[in-house]
């Protein structure tokens, strides 16, 4: 089996450079480096609070991990410590047109199921449901028969399932398109195709090195996802970040075969059907690639394992054809919790990103960091990086 490696939209996206209220010759109040969902949300909330903000990315906004992930908005796959954040972010995604100048990612609210096919998976499911329920997620354990009532397309091989009524999903490839008008309307200076190669403390702020003229900013936010390890090194810090190369698969358009977000207790399946009939199959199966080179190729054996598991869970998929597959990088810290907060020892330098399943909570994380940068008390605690890093030099 072979599959082409491409993005959901098929092909690269090139954008020009957009300027906000300041020009490159002036110091911005804040420069956000990395224009994924967390960087975009941070920049938007800072600009709306009156700051002059530059948002820079080596490519187009939200075209790396934020634009090619599975788009799952789920409590079932979110770590228990992040449930309060995910619940608030879930609401933000569903109400995105209200706070993002009409921008949207076709977010859909629907039930979520995580199923167990074996006794060991059932034990795993029981424990995960328990800790997530304690954290505030409305998850209940149901029988296989009840799971089939919730999801009629489900196989009858399920022993136990965890049901969450407020899961959902989005079309991740729309993320940049959704944020762009709001960012520009807020006055954010958007620099796409502008790679930052280094940052230096200069006077009462920072100088950003780029291939074109440099930029000055009084504050900086590092929001580079899997590249945060390299970016933290600009400031003399060692911040280990693991890069996952996730494979995703989409089918041809089908008649309705499912109506939930479906996963397996093992974490090896993420499954949902979009309004156009296509079914997106994920689950963290790894492809070929790395942080430096990006996604290079699909592992055929992993693609086959992923689609077989999907067809086992939803039997109607057995005759479906794979339309395409692509790869997306996902960042993860040593404890799989976010890196969000001030950078120790570097005043006015902040960091955000690198968390497993970060798309779900991304817009809310950006809102919280913007509150902290403005000197306000965040609604929920941040995740300072002291626990994760070591100094390379003084």
Image (tube, rainbow, N blue to C red):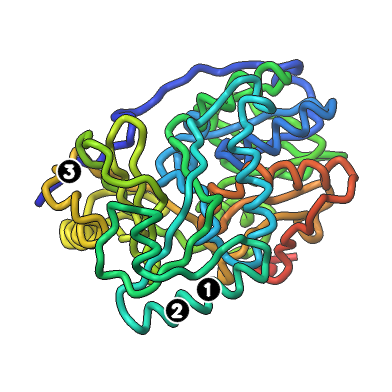
Q: CA distance from mark 1 to mark 2?
A: 6 Å
Residue under the point 56% across and 18% down: 17
In this view, the residue in front, 55 or 299, is 299
Of circles 2 and 3, the one toward us is 2
Q: Quadrant of residue 191?
A: top right
Of circles 1 and 3, the one toward us is 1
Q: Quadrant of the C terminus?
A: bottom right
The tag on residue 124 is 2
Please say if the residues under marks 1 and 2 sit with CB atoms less than 8 Å apart. yes
Please say if the residues under marks 1 and 3 sit with CB atoms less than 8 Å apart. no
In the rendered structure, the answer to whether residue 117 lies left or right of residue 186 reads left
Place of residue 61 in the rendered image (x, y in percent of width and height, measured from the top left) = 52, 31
Place of residue 210 in the rendered image (x, y in percent of width and height, measured from the top left) = 58, 32
In the rendered structure, the answer to whether residue 172 lies left or right of residue 202 reads left
Name which of mark 1 and mark 3 comes first in the sequence.
1
In this view, the residue in front, 348 or 153, is 153
Residue holding disc 1: 128
Place of residue 337 in the rendered image (x, y in percent of width and height, measured from the top left) = 61, 64
Place of residue 325 in the rendered image (x, y in percent of width and height, measured from the top left) = 24, 44
Residue under the point 62% across and 31% down: 96
Q: Secondary structure at mark 1?
A: helix
In this view, the residue in front, 122 or 62, is 122
| Number of residues whose C-alpha sits closer than 10 Å to that of mark 3, classed few (under 14), some (14–19) or many (20 or more) | many
Q: Is residue 146 visible?
A: yes
Q: Secondary structure at mark 2?
A: helix
Q: Secondary structure at mark 3?
A: strand
Q: Quadrant of residue 29?
A: top right
Residue holding disc 3: 322
Residue under the point 56% across and 64% down: 139
The tag on residue 294 is none
């Amino acid at each position: 089996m072979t599959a082409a490696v491409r993005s959901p939209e098929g092909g690269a996206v090139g954008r020009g450079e957009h300027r906000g209220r300041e020009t490159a010759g002036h110091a911005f109040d804040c420069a956000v480096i990395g224009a994924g969902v967390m960087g975009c949300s941070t920049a938007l909330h800072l600009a709306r609070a009156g700051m002059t903000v530059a948002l820079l990315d080596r490519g187009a906004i939200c075209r790396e991990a934020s634009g090619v992930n599975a788009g799952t908005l789920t409590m079932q796959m979110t770590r228990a410590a992040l449930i309060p954040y995910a619940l608030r972010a879930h609401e933000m995604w569903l109400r995105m047109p209200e706070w993002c100048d009409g921008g949207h990612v076709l977010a859909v609210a629907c039930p979520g199921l995580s199923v167990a096919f074996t006794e060991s998976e059932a034990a795993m499911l029981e424990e995960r449901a328990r800790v997530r329920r304690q954290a505030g997620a409305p998850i209940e354990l149901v029988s296989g028969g009840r799971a089939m009532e919730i999801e009629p397309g489900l196989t009858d091989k399920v022993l136990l399932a965890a049901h969450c009524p407020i899961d959902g999903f989005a079309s991740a490839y729309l993320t940049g398109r959704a944020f762009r008008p709001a960012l520009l309307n807020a006055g954010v200076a958007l620099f796409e195709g502008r790679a930052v190669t280094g940052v230096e403390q200069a006077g009462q702020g920072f100088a950003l090195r780029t291939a074109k003229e440099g930029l000055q900013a009084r504050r900086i936010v590092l929001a580079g996802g899997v590249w945060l390890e390299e970016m933290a090194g600009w400031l003399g810090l060692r911040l280990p970040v693991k890069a996952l190369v996730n494979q995703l698969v989409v089918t041809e358009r089908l008649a309705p075969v499912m109506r939930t977000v479906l996963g397996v207790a093992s974490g090896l399946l993420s499954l949902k059907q979009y309004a156009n009939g296509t079914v997106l199959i994920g689950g963290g199966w790894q492809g070929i690639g790395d942080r430096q080179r990006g996604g290079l190729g699909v592992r055929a054996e992993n693609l086959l394992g992923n689609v077989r598991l999907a067809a086992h869970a939803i039997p109607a998929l057995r005759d479906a054809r794979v339309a395409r597959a692509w790869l997306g990088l996902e960042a993860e810290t040593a404890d799989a919790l976010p890196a969000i907060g001030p950078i120790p020892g570097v005043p006015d330098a902040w960091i955000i990103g690198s968390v497993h399943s970060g798309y779900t909570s991304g817009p809310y994380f950006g809102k919280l960091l913007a509150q902290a940068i403005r000197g306000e008390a965040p609604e929920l605690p941040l995740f300072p990086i002291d626990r994760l890093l070591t100094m390379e030099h003084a």
